[in-house]
């Protein structure tokens, strides 16, 4: 298959890229980024401006899309900037990929995503899920992790505080609230893209703990 990965420089997206690189079911990988990626076999990594995506680029022709773009309100600096990264970019990518024939789209979303949520973060996550649904993908999957476990390049203070607390309490709390290791999330994203099961699906946080 021909797989388009967006967000390949982030924690989860980079793990997806590594898994796809090693998977014989993936023949070609397209990973558009703002900054270049090191050359790899079967990888095409065009440098793009996400505010002005090239509408007719040949690399849009993919069988499936995995979108692992995401930021936080603190890193983005404002609600509009956050919405641009977590809603406008994923939606623009989906529309362009769909117009070039992509049949499957897999989104790395969040536990609690809901347009009516009290949290702006979860509102935006819910809105992108809602707005992807009418685009006509034969297979649409939302992977909804809670707290993501893994070493990020950027510092996220809230995660640094919560991670040891949740790790200590893991045996005592419901699975949906436990830490979701980034490699398990990445594997779920890739498997959903390759399987491309017809219809709309959700992979919930309690399926991403790696624990019984």
Image (cartoon, rainbow, N blue to C red):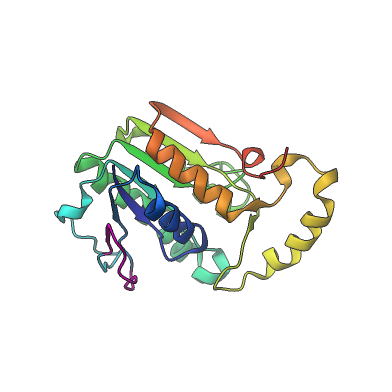
Which residue occupies the extreme top position in the image? 198
Relative to 58, 6 lies left or right: right
Q: Look at the magenta stretch and give its main secondary structure.
A: loop
Picture layout, residue 45 above or below residue 184: below
Relative to 210, 128 lies left or right: left
Quadrant where the C terminus lies? top right
Picture layout, residue 91 above or below residue 48: above
Q: Which of 67 and 55 is in front in this view?
A: 67
Whether residue 69 is visible: no
Q: Residue at x 62, y 52 (%)?
A: 119
Q: Is residue 33 magenta?
A: no
Whether residue 159 is visible: yes
The residue segment tinted magenta is: 34-45
Residue 194 screen position, x and y as percent: 38, 38
Q: Which residue is drawn at 16% across and 56% down?
A: 57
- For residue 81, what is the image quadrant? bottom left
Residue 105 screen position, x and y as percent: 37, 41
Residue 18 screen position, x and y as percent: 43, 58
- For residue 101, what is the image quadrant? top left
Relative to 8, 204 lies left or right: right
């Amino acid at each position: 298959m021909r797989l388009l990965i967006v967000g390949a420089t982030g924690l989860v997206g980079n793990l997806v890229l590594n898994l796809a690189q090693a998977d014989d079911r993936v023949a070609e990988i397209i990973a558009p980024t703002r900054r270049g990626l090191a050359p790899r076999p079967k990888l095409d990594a065009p440098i793009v401006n996400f505010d002005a995506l090239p509408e007719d680029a040949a690399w849009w022709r993919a069988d499936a899309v995995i979108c692992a773009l995401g930021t936080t309100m603190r890193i983005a600096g404002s609600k509009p900037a956050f919405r641009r990264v977590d809603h406008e970019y994923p939606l623009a990518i989906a529309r362009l990929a769909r117009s070039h024939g992509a049949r499957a789209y897999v989104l790395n979303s969040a536990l609690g995503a809901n347009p009516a949520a009290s949290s702006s973060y979860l509102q935006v996550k819910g809105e992108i899920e809602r707005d992807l649904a009418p685009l006509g993908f034969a297979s649409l999957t939302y992977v909804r992790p809670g707290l993501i476990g893994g070493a990020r390049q950027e510092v996220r203070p809230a995660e640094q505080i919560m991670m040891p607390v949740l790790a200590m309490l893991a045996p005592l709390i419901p699975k949906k609230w436990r830490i979701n290791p980034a490699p398990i999330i990445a594997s779920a994203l890739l498997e959903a893209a390759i399987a491309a099961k017809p219809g709309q699906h959700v992979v919930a946080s309690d399926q991403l703990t790696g624990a019984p």
